[in-house]
Amino acid sequence: MLGHAERRRLFGEDDDLIARKVAAAFDAGLVPLLCVGEDTRLGPEDAARHAVRQAAVLARLDTGRPSLVLYEPAWAIGDDHGASPGHAARVLEALHTALGTARTRFLYGGSVTPGTYTALRRAAPWDGVAVGRAAQDPGMLREVTAELLGSGPEGTPPQS
């Protein structure tokens, strides 16, 4: 996990240092998980521009190797409510457009709670979520299990 908001804030890690870390991860044969996201609540378009700028390190390296991009707005970490599905979808769409390759996967993190998973599943071009403390919530487990087993929350098949 490289470029996490807390490391950016606490240790002053900037995009150049993170790019060097991502390159080192590739050189070591690792699949980097690059964290991107805005510190303060922005509108979806501004948040998308910010996340794409941070994720540009992958385009600069252009290794053709697998990578993961986690959109996790810092303001949502530990909060009871993350980005709205529409907000997250806009940022993930922008990331997908800027970096979308068959080898890049896009995730959302930031207060993923029961209901968030299903709402994002319907709204965003994403490959998964990063679940923090909600991983211990039985409602979260039921929701994800229902989606993965093919019976969505209302008994409908999950989207592919």
Image: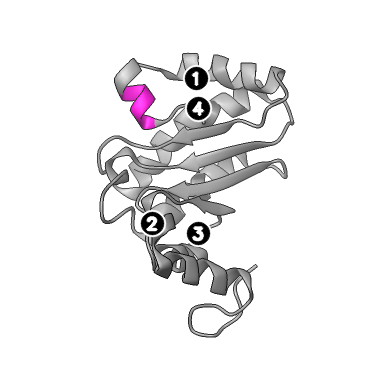
Residue 154 colored in magenta in the image? no
Q: In this view, does 57 lie above or below 98?
A: above
Q: Name the residue under label 4.
A: 2
Residue receiving disc 2? 134
Single out the mark in the foreground, 2 or 3: 2
Q: In this view, does 16 lie to the left or right of 133?
A: right
Q: Which residue is depicted at the point 56% across and 14% down?
A: 20
Q: How far apart are marks 4 and 1 (CA)?
A: 7 Å
Do labels 4 and 1 touch, CB within 8 Å? yes
Marks 1 and 3, the one that precedes in the sequence: 1
Q: How crowded is mark 3: few (under 14 residues within 10 Å), some or many (20 or more)?
A: many
Earlier in the chain: of badge 2 and badge 3, it is: 3
Secondary structure under badge 4? loop
The amino acid pointed to by label 1 is Ile
* Left or right, 92 with reference to 101: left
Magenta stretch bounds = 5-9
Residue type at mark 4 is Leu
Q: Residue 124 carries which label?
A: 3
Q: Which of marks 3 and 4 is nearer the N terminus?
A: 4
Q: How far apart are marks 4 and 2 (CA)?
A: 22 Å
Badge 2 density bin: few <14, some 14–19, many ≥20, Cα 10 Å:
some
Mark 3 vs mark 4, CA separation in Å:
23 Å
Element assignment for label 3: loop
For residue 40, above or below residue 108? above
- The picture places residue 145, in percent across and down from the top left corner, at 56, 69
**Mark 1 vs mark 3: in front:** 1
